[in-house]
Image: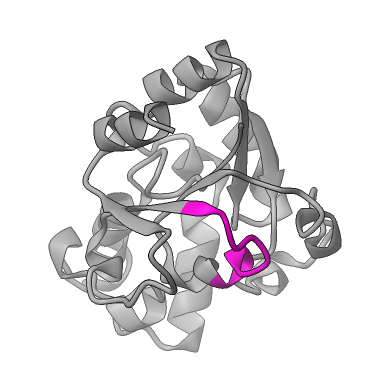
């Protein structure tokens, strides 16, 4: 099987780190469980310049390397790989974040997963543009059997795969969203994701 896995808030606790960062940078106190919008400027009520500063800080190498791992992620991905499944981490992080992201994966026992940056959210321009490691054209040529994703904004990248099973990692910002079709299932943790994939 081919399995797509998102990075932020599937493999690591970016949302929790961003909640702390918004308080530190701007005095915006929005607890993680109250982050009801995937758009960080909306969740933290940031103006355009604050948002730009916030995103740049949140993607600095030392910040990216500091994010806590989501429990059970590494064990599950490595189990899939040991069973012969092809696991690709496809992140909406800018291409400038590739190296620290790769370092984070390696440090958390995920040396065998493939990592690709894909401009899912149109934010590459905040980081000076640059090439992406996976173009949209190439992405749409790849077939996946399962996808693990937390962002409702990313669901549009699955429409070309009508049989794809999408496992939505439960987060505050996706609890009110409508799923596009019955192939989408909400999952509370990596153990529930592991069981679903093991059951085929």
Report whether 60 appears left or right of 21.
right
Query: Which quarter of the image is occupied by the N terminus?
Result: top right
- Is 120 one of the magenta-colored residues? no
Extreme-bottom residue of the structure: 47
Q: Examine the image and state in which quarter residue 195 appears.
A: top left
- Give how far across and how far down residue 36 sits, in percent: 24, 74
In the rendered view, would you say 31 is above or below 116? below
Q: Examine the image and state in which quarter residue 196 appears.
A: top left
Main SS of residues in magenta: loop
- Give how far across and how far down residue 29 sits, in percent: 16, 70
Q: Is residue 184 visible?
A: yes
In the rendered view, would you say 31 is above or below 45? above
- Give how far across and how far down residue 26 sits, in percent: 29, 72
Front one among 180 and 174: 180
Q: Residue at x 59, y 37 (%)?
A: 101
Q: Which residues are magenta?
A: 156-165
């Amino acid at each position: 099987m081919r399995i797509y896995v998102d990075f932020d808030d599937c493999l690591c606790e970016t949302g929790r780190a961003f909640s702390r960062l918004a308080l530190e940078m701007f005095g915006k106190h929005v607890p993680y469980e109250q982050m009801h919008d995937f758009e960080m400027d909306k969740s933290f009520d940031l103006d355009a310049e604050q948002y730009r500063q916030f995103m740049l800080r949140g993607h600095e190498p030392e910040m990216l390397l500091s994010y806590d791992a989501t429990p059970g992620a590494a064990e599950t991905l490595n189990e899939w790989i040991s069973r012969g499944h092809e696991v690709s981490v496809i992140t909406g992080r800018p291409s400038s974040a590739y190296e620290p992201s790769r370092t984070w994966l390696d440090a958390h026992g995920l040396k065998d997963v493939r990592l690709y940056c894909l401009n899912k959210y149109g934010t590459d321009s905040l980081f000076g543009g640059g090439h992406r490691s996976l173009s949209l054209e190439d992405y749409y040529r790849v077939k996946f059997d399962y996808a693990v994703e937390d962002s409702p904004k990313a669901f549009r990248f699955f429409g070309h795969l009508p049989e794809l099973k999408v496992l939505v990692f439960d987060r505050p910002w996706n609890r009110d969203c409508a799923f596009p079709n019955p192939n989408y299932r909400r999952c509370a943790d990596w153990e529930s994701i592991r069981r679903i994939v093991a059951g085929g």
